Amino acid sequence: QVQVAESGGGSVQAGGSLRLSCTASGLQFDDYAMGWFRQAPGKEREGISCITDGGGTTYYADSMKGRFTVSRDNAKNTLYLQMSSLKPEDTAIYYCAARGPYCSSHWSDAEDYKYWGQGTQVTVSS
């Protein structure tokens, strides 16, 4: 049984930083590219980033380049998202998800991801 779980969310003031983690079990972690998504209240889920199976290539949404950094430790079956210079508009539930080994040019299409976590809440106050 595949299980994906995010952690590390919480409340932070604007300008602060958080690091989210995502652990996966029940699958061969290094066979999967991993993505981060978020969904704010009343808004559609949006793609943040994707990292290939070996971690050699990363993709980011334009609005998050330079502030968010994705990484992974395949030995620990763990994905990370380092977030800095957080803004109130970053408030959302953050999800990680697994897909095939490559991110592709359509990496932000949520329907291409097979396994999802339950999400972790990030709240940024002004």
Image: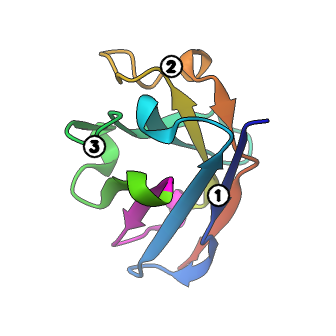
Q: CA distance from mark 1 to mark 3?
A: 18 Å
* The quarter of the displayed image where residue 97 is located: top right
Q: Secondary structure at mark 2?
A: loop
Q: Secondary structure at mark 3?
A: loop
Q: Earlier in the sequence, mark 3 or mark 2?
A: 3
Q: Earlier in the sequence, mark 1 or mark 2?
A: 1
| Residue 55 badge | 3
Give the residue number, with chain letter if any, for mark 1: 6
Q: CA distance from mark 3 to mark 2?
A: 19 Å
Measured as percent of width and height from the top left, residue 23 is found at 59, 55
Measured as percent of width and height from the top left, residue 50 is found at 38, 36
Q: Is residue 112 magenta?
A: no
Q: Which residues are magenta?
A: 77-90
Name the kind of residue labelled 3 in the image. Answer: Gly
| Camera-nearest label, 1 or 2 | 1
Binning the other alpha carbons within 10 Å of mark 1 as few (below 14), some (14 to 19) or many (20 upward) gives many
Q: Which residue: 33% across, 50% down?
A: 64
| Camera-nearest label, 1 or 3 | 3
- Whether 20 is drawn above or below 10: the answer is above
**Residue 94 or residue 2, whichever sits in front:** 2
Q: Which residue: 32% across, 33% down?
A: 52
Give the residue number, with chain letter if any, for mark 2: 109
